[in-house]
Amino acid sequence: MSERSLLTVWRGSDAQAGRWESYEVPFEPGQSVLDGLRWIRINCDPSLAVRFSCINANACKECMIELDGETVYACTARLRSGEMKLAPLSNKTLVRDLVTEIAPPAERFKGQVK
Amino acid sequence: MSVEPMRAQADVLVIGSGAAGMYAAIEAARAGCSVLLADRSLIGRGGATVMAQMTVAVALGSETPDHWTHHYDDTLRAGRGLSNEALARLLCEQGPDCIRAMDEWGVGWARKDGRITQAMAPGHDRPRCVYVDFLSTGPAVSKTLRTVVNRTPGIRRAGDLCVVDLVRHGSAVTGAVALHLGSGAPVVINTKTTIVATGGLTRLYRRNSASANMGGDGYALALRAGAVLTDMEFVQFFPIGHLAPRLVGMDPIMWDPFRYKLGGRLLNNRGEEFTQTYGVVEDGKYVVTRDVGSYAIVKEVEAGRGSPHGGVYLSFQHCSERALRDAFGPVIDKLAANGIDLTQTPVEVAPIAHYHMGGIAVDDAMRTGVPGLFAAGEAVGGANGANRLSGNAVTEALVFGRQAGRSAAAHAARVNAVPDGGDNIRVTLDLLAADAPQSDLNTAELVQRLQATMQDDVGPLRTADKLARALETIDAMTRQLGDTPPGAGSFDMRRLDWLDLRNMLLVARAVTQSALARTETRGAQQREDFPQMSPQWAVNQVVSWRDGALAVSHGEAATKAAAS
């Protein structure tokens, strides 16, 4: 039998004017928080923004978020029963939902506006 | 609402920052070019390179005497008669040089008594694969190249930049139109030359071993810009991808290096070794090649002899705790954190989409035939024919990346000024300015359905019926996708999914049509309705885009021309 986790996720593009949304996510023990976020995108809301590339290997290091106030990789943190609160990194500039500006300044695109 | 596009210029645009893209950028910048290195994710962290676990095949001869021609012979044998000989030769001949350059840059190849260690891998006639312990080859290669990129003058790096279309100017490519994910703004990039280094297409499959950004976008970009794709039917399934129990923080292809170092036994649910039924006696050693391994596992499962999650067992129960620790050190602790003790229980494994032999057709200077457009790395098709030898992917990324950088720089030197404008810029900007009214389209769910179709109907074992059904599904999904993307603004994942699906559906069709046309079994193309390899099919297929439709044809002439 699968268990259920209540993921409460910070949503919005403005750090001052966001909102919390909760999703009930089924899971098998051992599954990751990123598995849960991908499940939400497929089954509830595809607009949920989360940065990830390698999905499972903890190789790309892109999926850093705050889980109950602690910085974690969503791909290695595990889902558990009960509520889990997911927020964007508080020490980085917010882009949208769980996505923050984590690239070093020299790796950010700077084009000219014509 | 239309947003004014941002602008950028460079001599060379490199799309994708895996090993191929980074090496190309370094080489072009060293030749004096201004380079824009763009990636849809972070620079040098996504793609397939960072996921590489262990083997990099190269005729260094540090373990036993070797010569590139031996590596070349093995590569052609694995390719089942379809390798582009010029590309295979380039890979094998220049591999040692690139591996030594990486060594000088401090990648840290594993050594014993001062000599670089070379491991034996299936399909090779001698120990030939260098690696970085423990299971750190990909991260080490990525990090080393990132460091060199950072200190090379002339390279600008741009993450979160998703290229939507290449810009055509007459018959030539003169840049790209991209979506800047962070701001949601369109970007027009004018360049003298463009290198596609976007990797393969494994994201098309439900079970895959590469990053979420490998959906074949470079193939679609090149195809729409007039380039030709080759060998698209040949998707390599890695036979022993991790299946169960759930394992996080590790790459699913990690059992490959375990088998290199420790052998291991593949067992069905009766506890019996089974590869001998399919013509390969393993006897505790790792000798089964990837095409035969995938076939054997799928057939065992079909015969009701599979494991609970639909794969087979891989056992290292013959190994002592000491032997495991000596071979893999901290990895054993990671396994323990996932509740896995290899001395006690086997794991479940099953085929997983791992690599694409096909890709953009190029000559041995990495030229696509479209002026100004080059390709590098896994995005290139042909070197590995119908089946890739283990260890050739990173070597190919390095060698082809370096070659593409050199060729693009030479081409750029002959172009006087960075061209302005282009034939299709307005069309792509209009696409990005649009907001589809059908905002209820669940793009993430559509990606998942496409992955299921490709896995089930265009997977390791194929039939005409399954392939025809897949084409119908792809048609229906293409209609459902519509002509305009949903969403807007910063980091809109629906918009990104939509742009990805536009490419993924086109590439899925190219794979499926090519697989349907090839009525034989060869290497990674396993047709259950045509189980034999057929001499008249010793020919490459090419895919082109003509008047809004895909055309699959025989491409022997093109391959031979490139080889001469």
Image: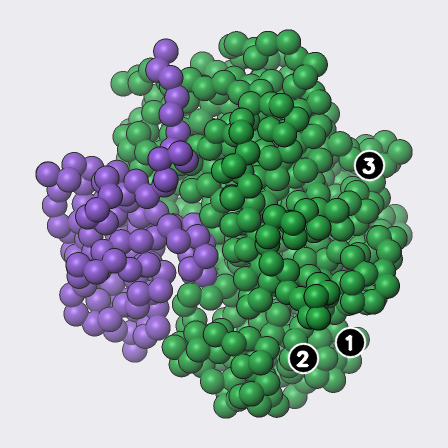
Chain colours: A purple, B green
In front of the other: B330 or B73 = B330
Residue B509 horizontal/vertical position (percent): 59, 41
Decide: is B248 above or below B284: above
**Mark 2 = which residue?**
B263
Give the crowd class for mark 3: few <14, some 14-19, many >=20 residues within 10 Å.
many
Q: Are marks 2 and 3 on the same chain?
A: yes
For residue B559, which numbered disc appears in the image?
3
Q: Are the residues under marks 2 and 1 on the same chain?
A: yes
- A100 shown above or below B12: below
- Residue type highlighted by circle 1: Val
**Residue assigned mark 1:** B280
State which quadrant residue B443 falls in. top left
Q: Nearer the viewer, mark 2 or mark 1?
A: 2
Q: Are marks 2 and 3 in contact (CB under 8 Å)?
A: no
Chain of the residue on which disc 1 is drawn: B
- Mark pair 2, 3: CA separation: 38 Å
Residue at x 83% of width, y 67% of height:
B64
Quadrant for the C terminus of chain B, please: top right
Res. B92 in view: yes
Disc nearer the start of the sequence (2/1): 2
Q: Amino acid at mark 3?
A: Thr
Chain to which the residue tagged by mark 3 belongs: B
Q: Are marks 1 and 3 on the same chain?
A: yes
Number of residue marks = 3
